[in-house]
Image (spheres, coloured by chain):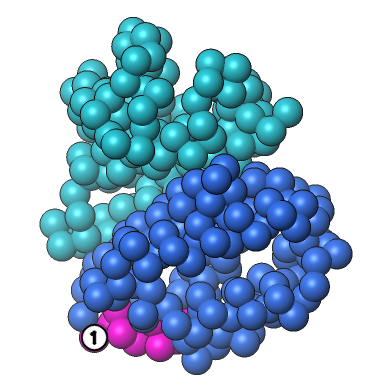
Amino acid sequence: MPFKGRLVTLIEENADELTKKWLEVVRTHPDMPTYRSYDETKLYERAFSVYSQLSKWLSEETTKEEIKDIYFALGKQRKEEGFKLSELLLALIITRRILWLKIPKGDLLETITDLHAGMRLSNNTILFFDRAMFYAAQGYEV
Amino acid sequence: MLLSRKLIALIETNAEELTTKWMEIVRTHPDTPTYHTHDPEQLHERAYSVYSQLGKWLSDATTKDEIQEIYSTLGRHRREEGFTLSEVLQALTITRRVLWLKIESDGLLDSALDMSLAMHLSNRTVLFFDRAMFYTARGYES
């Protein structure tokens, strides 16, 4: 399996661990008060659906429109539920940061091919979350 | 960290070119409509201040509080000026993308060591913009 595929599989196989780590952070973070009292199962489901299907989200077959549908609706829903937009953005940033904890850093990737694959994965992940954050903000503003 | 310094210098010395590219995008992008009519000099100043001082922004000596002060104020101003928060976030995302495209195209990332250091720089850049976006949202909401 190509290196990028191995990294994505690594994330997907550890989706439960990553989701629990994410929950721990967002439910105690001083800048995210609304997450503390929100239904934990619903939060778990949302984060798990990102980590466990990362290959789908980072695939070129996943269109901007699919990301828009999901995150626009999330933004709208979180507004109705009383979250601040800054909390929602921070939750998405934390989702991406926790994902990155699982991926070997530059100094652990030895070959130029692995490094290129690591960089591509990084760029794809950043692009996906850029879109998720933008559409969540648009949905929130409706 | 010689390459990191080289890449930062690449951005800082090309700040004018990058700012012009950023202006071109935000002043025509369908998702940033208020930027199409906003005072170009003010926009130029803001983007130029990021590109021309990138080393300062990415330095360990720059505290979260400094980023908070500048971007909370930016968020508050943009709200008063009639921008939606989603377009301000999109403009920040475009600032980061324009910067990174320059590094990828001119950064001479040939060796494994260069790639590894570039990934390190990428992580620092993402961290800076994460903070900038979060504090902008907080300032906008205040």
Front-most of residues B64 and B114: B64
Front-most of residues A115 and A96: A96
Q: Quadrant of the C terminus of chain A?
A: top right
Name the spot of residue B41 as percent of width and height, x first. Answer: 74, 80
Residue under the image location 73 percent in, 63 percent down = B26
Q: Is residue B73 in sight in this rendering?
A: yes
Name the subunit of mark 1.
Answer: B
Q: How many marks?
A: 1
Which residue is situated farthest in the front direction here? B142
Q: Is residue A112 in sight in this rendering?
A: no
**Chain letter of the cyan region:** A
Name the spot of residue B40 as percent of width and height, x first. Answer: 78, 75
Residue under the image location 31 percent in, 21 percent down = A36
- In reply to whether residue B10 is colored magenta, the answer given is yes
Residue under the image location 55 percent in, 45 percent down = B142
Name the spot of residue B67 as percent of width and height, x first. Answer: 40, 64
User: Is residue B61 depicted above or below B33 in this figure?
Assistant: below
User: Is residue A70 depicted above or below B95 in this figure?
Assistant: above
| Residue A26 sits in quarter | top left
| Residue A33 sits in quarter | top left
Segment tinted magenta in the rendering:
B2-11
Which hue is chain B drawn in? blue
* Residue position for label 1: B2
SS of the residue under disc 1: helix
